[in-house]
Amino acid sequence: MQDTPPSVPDFTQWPSFPFEGDLRVKQLDDPVSVEPPRRGEEDRECTACNAPDEAYIWVGERWRVRAMDRPTGLPMVLILESRSHLDLGDLPNLLAAELGVMTVRLERAIRSLDGVARVHVNRWGDGSAHLHMWFLARPYGRLQLRGTFLSLWDSILPPIPEAQWRENLAMVAAWLAEFGGRPLAEPPRIHWQAPSSFSAVTATDADAGEEEAVSVIEAAEEIPEPEGRTDEEPDGGTDEEPDGGTDEKSESGADEELASGADGQPESGAGEKPESGRNEVSESRAG
Ligand SMILES: [Zn+2]
């Protein structure tokens, strides 16, 4: 019930902002007194804990890496998960230190893919309680994709070719396996007679669960309120008016803190050339 809606911020005029035309700022719902449980909290199942290793492209003793179910608009989108059901702030020192190592390792692996300029590392966690870090690759030369709107562009751009996607997955899996663990994404087997068809045995073919990971924004892990959940709010103050439109805000789960912070705003002309050599990791994949 604001009398004067807030004006549309300047970033809607940036080249990196994916939309144009007349925009209005949504009115905020009233805050709830008790937030609903995330996946993996209270009575809600944890997708990550239930997922078999085969749903991942690389698995280690304490960490696993997985991809979306299918190619998306960005050259590579990966999720790093701990095996233990912990959230970021709950990690013991060993896992906390390993998270740093894994983050650096994965960033480097993804940045080494052809056509990748930068890797954005994100953690939201409003949808799932199980620690999961996002690694989003920005395509080289796409200056308009610089900055915090990259996760939106992942859903907007046409998906990259599946063959390239599988090749990228295999590269990253092999890279990680150089340091240990098990790569599960294998290079695609191209049928040269019919160039458009190929088969690949990758982990992502395995059923990762009922929920489909379509893109960053639409990923179940980041959507705070699942579609099917119709039970009452946990004794909050607002549960008297179920159809008042106060709880239908779930579409854009991951847009929290997207456009905040000036450090996400790219400066023009910034950016060094990445070393985009494909390193020789694929030769020595451990079985
Ligand atoms: Zn879990």
Image: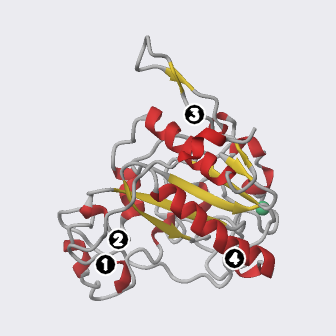
The residue beneath circle 1 is: 265
Q: On the picture, is 183 further left or further right than 41?
A: left
Residue 147: which numbered mark, if any?
A: 2
Image spot of residue 177 (x, y percent): 68, 50
Name the amino acid type tagged 4.
Leu
Q: Does label 1 or label 4 sit earlier along the sequence?
A: 4
Image spot of residue 231 (x, y percent): 71, 61
Where disc 4 sits, the SS reads helix
* Residue shown at the point (81%, 58%) measured from the top left: 61
Local crowd at mark 3 within 10 Å, few (<14), some, or many (≥20)?
many
Q: Does label 3 or label 2 sit earlier along the sequence?
A: 2
Measured Cα–Cα span from mark 3 to mark 2: 31 Å
Measured Cα–Cα span from mark 2 to mark 4: 23 Å
The residue beneath circle 4 is: 88
In the rendered image, the residue lying farthest to the top is: 193
The residue beneath circle 3 is: 187
